[in-house]
Image (spheres, rainbow, N blue to C red):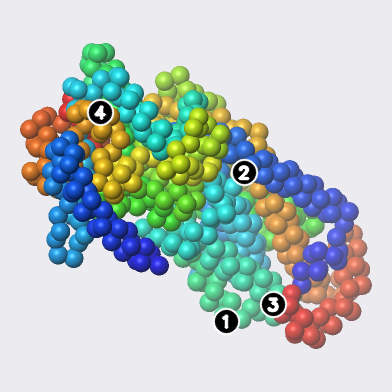
Amino acid sequence: MIEKALVKRTSKAYWAWIAFLAALFAVGFAAYIYQMVNGFHVTGMSRDISWGMYIGHLTFFVGVAAGGVMIVLPYYLHNVKEFGRITVVGEFLAIPAIIMALLFVVVDIGSPMKLFNVYLYYTPHSMLCWDATVLPIYLVLNLIVGYNVLQAENKGRKYGKIVKALAVFSIPFAFSIHIVTAWLYAGLPSRHYFLTAMLPAKFLAGAFATGPALIILICFILNKLTGFDAGKKAIDRLATTVAYAYTATIFMVVCEFFTAFYSNVPSHKAALQYLFAGLHGHNQFVPLMWLFVVLAVVTLIIMIPRQTRTNYKLLGFGCVTAFLSMYIEKGLTFVIGGLSETPFGEIASYHITLPEFLVIVGIFALGILIASILFKLVVVVKKDMDLDAFPQEDRAALPMKYVAEYNAANGIAAEVPVVEAEPEEAKAE
Amino acid sequence: MEMNRRKFLKLGTAAVAGLGVAAAATNPAVAAAVNGSYKETAGKVSDVTWGMVIDMNKMDEATLNRCIEACHKFHNVPNIDTKKDEVKWIWGETFEHLFLDEVHEKMGDKFKDRNFMTICNHCAEPVCVRVCPVKATFMNAQGVVGMDMHRCIGCRNCMAACPYGARSFNYKNPRNYLDEINPSYPTRMKGVVEKCNFCSERLAVGEMPLCVEEAGGAIIFGDISNPDSAVSKAIAENFTLQRRSNLGTKPKVYYIV
């Protein structure tokens, strides 16, 4: 099946895109080598702010990975049929997202050659240990389920019972990856921005907004590039999910403000003051946080009323603002904000460095590269399904693009049964 | 494997305990501080719990600097002078920074700015040990919170967790920042976390921590589980503070202010 995405029915533009991403990844890898040779002092991290952009990105992308469950859960548990066509998009989105999250941990580890000590000296009272447990499991589950669902569709039959069981089994893991990541922070005494029981709920709500928002955007992009249609009902339902989850997230952000400023406890206020207004002369994140506020307001205005949410141009824009605002709040500023007040009551600032930025770019490039290959695969399989289902005599009514692809698909149609006839080869895929 | 190593270390401690008592008997200063601290009890090699009282009436700037120098020199602590990347086991910090919950707006500068000796608190409920994913930081049988820098993966979770800022990460290669190397203590590589270890390598052979020796009476060290020890008496008879005692970490370093 993978040969379909990798070899068959590819365009020059596709290969140029893949090559561009691979080049970016190479740049990031070189920056990582530079960091490992010279030591972590080439990053913005310090004795005071010991976790920075890398761990922030880990947190955000665990959320993106968990967000896909907002398709998987309704489909497998509540039989929401309109998601049937795109469950695999949710499952496949989780794969690059977890790979990115894991890579953001790896590049943050000072002695990566000792990384597997985490499994050698397994320590359940460490939350990081649980992160290292649930993330790989969730990755493997999504690989198995996503691949088998698509493979079944490719062969024109329904996925098996075991695949469904694994899909259902993956649902609690989607929740736990983000809960565990929140507990990484929420159990640290003296870090008041982190030390809140609200954190796992806030993280999950944010994830359930960003994940579906990204899936809507991916569906729109695939539609534009390839003519893939996710179905209006599925998009509308996902948009509703974004609306509810995003509103819940912003509500929890407001709750943080209330508790900090109504109680007036200085250490509860410190991180919020530092991020949104500046504290003790440190105000580097203030413009970014106000951008977050503006994006959040725009998102709420677009996503809450039904009229704007069902207008696809506005919906696309709203999904971009939802995604970007959560990227700022959770990915860029959460970790650094929480560590900004040092144990000595001072404010430490953080300035990202070029090598650090390039490493992040490299991981993004790899994630997008994996996503491009996976979604290419999805589109090819889905379009073959559509064409197979389309009555022969009505095919002239299809758009030109479809007809051209249909001809191409006809060209390879002779090869497909050969692959199917050899189950061993199919397994080897 | 783990248990064997632990047993081995315990046996080692038992062996040197004898030496320790002998050393204490010959050195009156050590004897006074330790106060016959190694006791044999059923099933346990030792039930000593090391603790420290820093007497700020006696700890002046010169004494503090002597302590820092002796400690950093012996433990091959790199001398990096940028605040971002520095590594430190002992240092001076103002009252305002150290006891931030005790400071009020109108406190006079001479109290706020008083320089206090700052080291790892060797908490009885250490957050760093709780969060470490590989048990590279651990508490030994005598309550010392130690670091296995060979095992540390450099994830820096302990640094985010420590409410006392006691931990340093080797952002730079520490071996490039040593004037001379003490061959009797290992150097580190970049990418691992380190901190004060209460001189557990010296305690194991019956010697007092270096800062205690250098401080000449300004630091009282001994078994805080024994009410008759000098350190317990110093805590009982003087007004002492612990850093951020409201966090439940139960520090074993006390300050006479």
> Mark 2 or mark 3, which has the lower sequence index?
2
What is the x, y in percent for residue A367?
67, 52
Give the spatial CA distance, label 4 vs label 1: 72 Å
The nearer-to-camera label among 4 and 1 is 4
Residue pointed to by mark 1: A161
Residue pointed to by mark 3: A152
Disc 4 marks a residue whose amino acid type is Ala
Give the spatial CA distance, label 4 vs label 2: 40 Å
Residue pointed to by mark 2: A36
Residue visible at 80% across and 75% down in the picture? A388
Residue pointed to by mark 4: B215
Would residue A190 be seen by someone viewing this image from the given angle?
no
User: What subunit carries mark 2?
Assistant: A
The nearer-to-camera label among 4 and 2 is 4
> Mark 2 or mark 1, which has the lower sequence index?
2
What is the x, y in percent for residue A229?
73, 60
